Image (cartoon, helix red, strand yellow):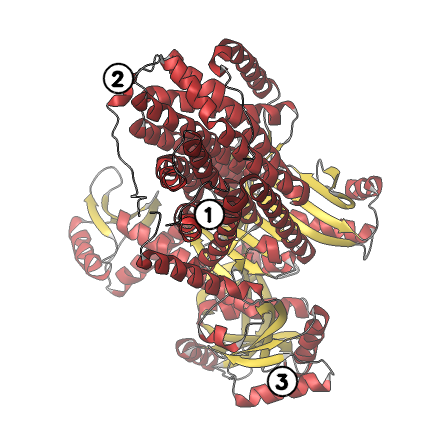
């Protein structure tokens, strides 16, 4: 009695081997490394490898290993963090035109392991250092903008179709289009229904006159919000990529939040500036006929709008925009070759280039203005409730005379500093945000604290483990040793499953593992105490083993399921750190049930099964 | 055989004294919660927390003076873990969601002691997020209690369920009471610990109840009280050993896990000790007082969830 069939033993052996294999990569040390990607318009080729190796040799930085990764990246490893930084300097100084660098870490795995696709666990930001921010997207503002856009489009459409209307007014989330007579309104309704399938129209003849009401259906509103969020994620991703940070993670959280995680990033100030900025540029013609003084006094010339320049002086610009920020395909910072002042070199897409060419051809000799637009969001508490206000800051940063027609590529000057030129170029390159955003949570961990956390975490796992192992060995002797072996296997399996699920290990996660160590032996304690009881009431050793495992089973399962319920609740309601704890706790509970019930039984069966025993070393 | 020799004790005879003791504990905990309230950490209140490391032991007075020159409102400055580490807490003021505040503070500190300050950690939580975290945490506690209650009721009987929940709430409330009384920082980690204790305490209680059910079925004779007592005694060595191993590892966490896990491990420590006590005195006593009888348990399904036989 007390023997497992062969298949069961083989299955257990299989799980152990797979677990060991999956957990193995975690034993290798992490090398400081640099990830090298090609700059815009460049490629990583075989020549890049030689070029970078040569640059590092020139700078006398010893290179440990360099290789081409998938997706057009190079990974260079170094022996120390100091050499890693020197190498980044060397590459940035000599090859910054063509390559972008990002600091990262990479496990020093042997080739076959990499070939199998094995990877060490992901370490959370609290263990490796980095920045975690949660960004709230102002979706109401996105909706607002959409309504505004529709109101312009409706105007344009009616004008184009030569349908006369008296006014288009905002009424909450609806647009009121007022007509002189019902016949015109009906024509308009037909026209608009055909053109604007996203809007729903309704006729109304109450106090406001003969009116057509246009509103956004629920589904359309949701789509607009979804689109704004997705667009913001794309833009943020572009911006983060431009910053040169390896392995960034940008993910949607819930309905209106975005989580940005940047391992290894060190400068939260700059990051927040770049993430939150909503700057874009607009090119407009200057209204040279209208009088600025009249406009300031309130008599605005038709088709013009009043702006201010950086010194606060009023300036009158045409309402029609020549080119907006989203038509810009590329932008880079540099210096104006004549004046030496900071400049942004701008490339336009086909449509923008055509328009720019048309407008500049017609207006040679006239001044054109560049407007810098930024949305600044602030939140204030009003009666205890936070109220968000988004202020649109529009400034004319430069006015220049059009000397000759130009199109696809040109430059803009008038920026305050080369930093501003640099940031503006970066923002133009990555596109504008579809809706204003605000940082609502930030957690930054410096690299030294990350390392401290790892050390302390490992220490407490180790010490907790040793204490439990010593106790179990002394108290239960051979059975205790089995429990200890199973406990070690449990640790290996937790690490393996964490790697397999691609879960991230955090400091609370380590706490979860430590706690699992303490609780995992509980199953074995239950079984062993039961076996002792059975022995005490005079059962044979073999029968005691069988009865001990069998009778303890329902207690073990009941006990683990209740804790599992708590862990699942923690996982579904918790955020960030708490989630990490819940994940390791839940994984630990499941693996500990498997190891403490099945694996320990297999070991006991192998040791004692089918033998004639006088007593049990329990 | 090397084993803890335990005398067969009449635990439940002490149940009235235990109830008075627990009642007093609960009253103190509730009063502390009402009078002092929980010292809610940044996770729930919102605000900014900055941890900086100095290259030499930090002069807190100098740090305060430097900060007073900037307009940051009330800044709490304290040592954290070692003499070189300083923790700054800045509660949210009027203008909320000020994510740039930490940059300004760091700049002031850097100007006051150039080259000596190293950023170790920044945590900024907007008040809205804090409110949400508090809400979600409350829901997490509520749903786990409900989920466990349903599970225990299905597997056992409602009287046991009530006993288990009474014991569990006792432990959770005691932790909250201690944190309120000593005004310890109550953050998300501590909350996670409270939930873990809920799981652990139940785990403990269920092992005893499992034995009670088994004994009710096995022993034809005996008053419920006697059977309860016997079951508690039979599982006593397991209860002590498991509590012991968990305490070992939690102590390891407390002593070596670093400053940020101290509250977490303290809460667990209280919970493990209280959980062991409450299993014996609260859970079983409640079930007995509610009048649990053999007939109640005979109807319970006899099934093993997993076939453990070879």
Residue A46 sits above or below residue A416 on the image: below
Crowding near pointer 2: few (<14 within 10 Å), some, many (20+)?
few
* SS under mark 1: helix
> Left or right: B191 with respect to A414?
left
Q: Nearer the viewer, residue A56 or B277?
A: B277
Q: Can residue B93 be seen in this view?
A: no
Instruction: From the image, tell me which residue sits under label 3.
Output: A52
Q: Whole-percent x and y of residue B305?
A: 29, 39
Q: Looking at the rendering, which quadrant does residue B250 occupy?
A: top right
Q: Whole-percent x and y of residue B139?
A: 42, 33
* SS under mark 2: helix
Crowding near pointer 3: few (<14 within 10 Å), some, many (20+)?
many
Residue A253 sits above or below residue B92 on the image: below
Q: Is residue B91 visible?
A: yes
Identity of the residue drawn at 21% across and 50% down? A201
Chain of the residue where label 1 is placed in the rendered structure: A
Nearer the camera: disc 1 or disc 2: 2
Instruction: From the image, tell me which residue sits under label 2.
Output: B295
Number of numbered markers: 3
Residue A360 sits above or below residue A193 on the image: below
The disc placed on residue A588 is 1
Chain of the residue where label 3 is placed in the rendered structure: A
Spatial CA span between label 3 and label 2: 81 Å
> Left or right: A150 with respect to A71?
left
Q: Are marks 3 and 2 in contact (CB under 8 Å)?
A: no
Spatial CA span between label 1 and label 2: 37 Å
């Amino acid at each position: 009695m007390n023997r497992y069939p062969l298949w069961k033993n083989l299955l257990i052996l299989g799980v152990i081997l797979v677990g060991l294999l999956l957990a193995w990569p975690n034993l290798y040390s992490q090398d400081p490394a640099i990830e090298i990607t090609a700059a815009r318009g460049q490629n990583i080729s075989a020549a890049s490898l030689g070029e970078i190796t040569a640059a590092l040799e020139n700078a006398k930085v010893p290179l440990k290993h360099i290789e081409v990764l998938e997706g057009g990246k190079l990974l260079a490893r170094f022996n120390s963090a100091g050499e890693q930084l020197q190498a980044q300097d060397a590459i940035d100084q000599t090859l910054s035109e063509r390559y972008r660098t990002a600091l990262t870490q990479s496990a020093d795995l042997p080739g076959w392991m990499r070939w199998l696709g094995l990877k060490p666990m992901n370490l959370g930001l609290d263990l490796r250092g980095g920045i975690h921010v949660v960004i709230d997207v102002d979706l109401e503002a996105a909706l607002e903008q959409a309504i505004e856009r529709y109101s312009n489009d409706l105007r344009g459409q009616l004008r184009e179709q030569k349908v006369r209307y008296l006014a288009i007014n905002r009424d909450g989330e609806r647009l009121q289009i007022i007509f002189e007579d019902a016949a015109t309104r009906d024509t308009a309704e037909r026209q608009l229904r055909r053109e604007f399938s996203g809007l729903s129209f309704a006729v109304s003849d109450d106090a406001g006159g003969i009116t057509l009401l246009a509103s956004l259906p629920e589904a359309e509103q949701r789509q607009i919000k979804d689109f704004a969020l997705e667009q913001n994620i794309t833009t943020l991703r572009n911006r983060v990529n431009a910053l040169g940070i390896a392995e960034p993670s940008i993910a949607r959280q819930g309905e209106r939040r975005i989580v940005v995680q940047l391992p290894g990033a060190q400068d939260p100030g700059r990051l927040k500036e770049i993430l939150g900025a909503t700057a874009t540029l607009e090119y407009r013609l200057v209204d040279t006929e209208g009088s600025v003084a009249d406009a300031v006094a309130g008599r605005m010339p038709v088709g013009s709008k009043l702006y201010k320049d950086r010194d606060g002086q009023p300036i009158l610009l045409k309402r029609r925009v020549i080119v907006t920020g989203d038509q810009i395909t590329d932008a880079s910072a540099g210096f104006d070759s004549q004046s030496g002042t900071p400049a942004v070199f701008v490339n336009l897409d086909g449509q923008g280039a055509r328009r720019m060419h048309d407008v500049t051809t017609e207006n040679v000799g006239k001044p054109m203005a560049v407007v810098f637009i930024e949305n600044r969001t602030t939140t204030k508490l009003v009666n205890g409730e936070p109220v968000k206000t988004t202020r649109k800051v529009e400034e004319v940063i430069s006015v220049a005379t059009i000397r000759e027609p130009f199109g696809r590529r040109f430059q803009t000057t008038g920026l305050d500093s080369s930093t501003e030129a640099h940031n503006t170029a970066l923002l133009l390159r990555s596109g504008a945000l579809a809706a204003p955003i605000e940082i609502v949570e930030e957690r930054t961990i410096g690299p030294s604290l990350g390392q401290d956390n790892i050390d302390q975490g490992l220490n407490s796992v180790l010490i907790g483990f040793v204490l439990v192992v010593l106790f179990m060995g002394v108290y239960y002797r051979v059975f205790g040793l089995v429990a200890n072996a199973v406990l070690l296997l449990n640790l290996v399996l937790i690490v393996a499953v964490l790697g397999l699920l691609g879960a991230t290990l955090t400091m609370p996660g380590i706490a979860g593992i430590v706690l699992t160590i303490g609780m995992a032996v509980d199953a074995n304690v239950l079984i062993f105490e039961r076996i002792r009881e059975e022995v005490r009431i005079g059962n044979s050793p073999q029968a005691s083993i069988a009865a001990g495992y069998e009778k303890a089973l329902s207690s073990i399962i009941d006990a683990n399921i209740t804790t599992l319920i708590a862990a699942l609740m923690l996982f579904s309601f918790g955020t960030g750190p708490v989630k990490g704890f819940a994940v390791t706790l839940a994984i630990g509970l499941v693996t500990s049930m498997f190891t403490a019930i099945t694996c320990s039984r297999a070991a006991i069966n192998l040791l004692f099964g089918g033998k004639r025993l006088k007593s049990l070393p329990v | 055989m090397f084993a803890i020799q335990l005398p067969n004790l009449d635990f439940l005879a002490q149940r009235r004294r235990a109830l008075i003791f627990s009642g007093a504990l609960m009253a103190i905990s509730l009063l502390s919660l009402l009078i002092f309230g929980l010292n809610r950490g940044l996770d729930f209140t919102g605000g900014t927390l900055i941890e900086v490391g100095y290259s030499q032991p930090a002069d807190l007075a100098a740090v305060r003076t430097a900060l007073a020159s900037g307009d940051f409102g009330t800044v709490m400055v304290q040592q954290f873990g070692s003499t070189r580490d300083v923790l700054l807490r800045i509660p949210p003021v009027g203008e909320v969601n000020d994510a740039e505040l930490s940059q300004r503070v760091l700049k002031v500190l850097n100007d006051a002691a150039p080259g000596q300050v190293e950023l170790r950690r920044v945590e900024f939580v907007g008040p809205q997020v804090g409110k949400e975290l508090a809400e979600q945490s409350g829901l997490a506690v509520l749903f786990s209690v409900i989920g466990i209650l349903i599970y225990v009721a299905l597997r056992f009987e409602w009287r046991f369920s009530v006993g288990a929940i009474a014991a569990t709430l006792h432990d959770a409330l005691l932790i909250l009471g201690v944190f309120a009384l000593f005004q310890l920082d109550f953050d998300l980690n501590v909350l996670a610990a409270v939930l873990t204790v809920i799981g652990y305490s139940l785990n403990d209680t269920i092992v005893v109840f499992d034995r009670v059910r088994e004994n009710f079925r096995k022993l034809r004779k005996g008053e419920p009280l006697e059977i309860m007592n016997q079951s508690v005694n039979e599982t006593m060595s397991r209860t002590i050993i498991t509590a012991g191993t968990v305490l070992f590892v939690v102590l390891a966490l407390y002593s070596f896990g670093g400053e940020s896990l101290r509250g977490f491990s303290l809460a667990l420590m209280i919970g493990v000790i209280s959980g062991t006590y409450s299993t014996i005195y609260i859970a079983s006593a409640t079930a007995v007082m509610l009048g649990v009888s053999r007939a109640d348990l005979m109807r319970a399904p006899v099934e093993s969830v997993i076939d453990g036989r070879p």
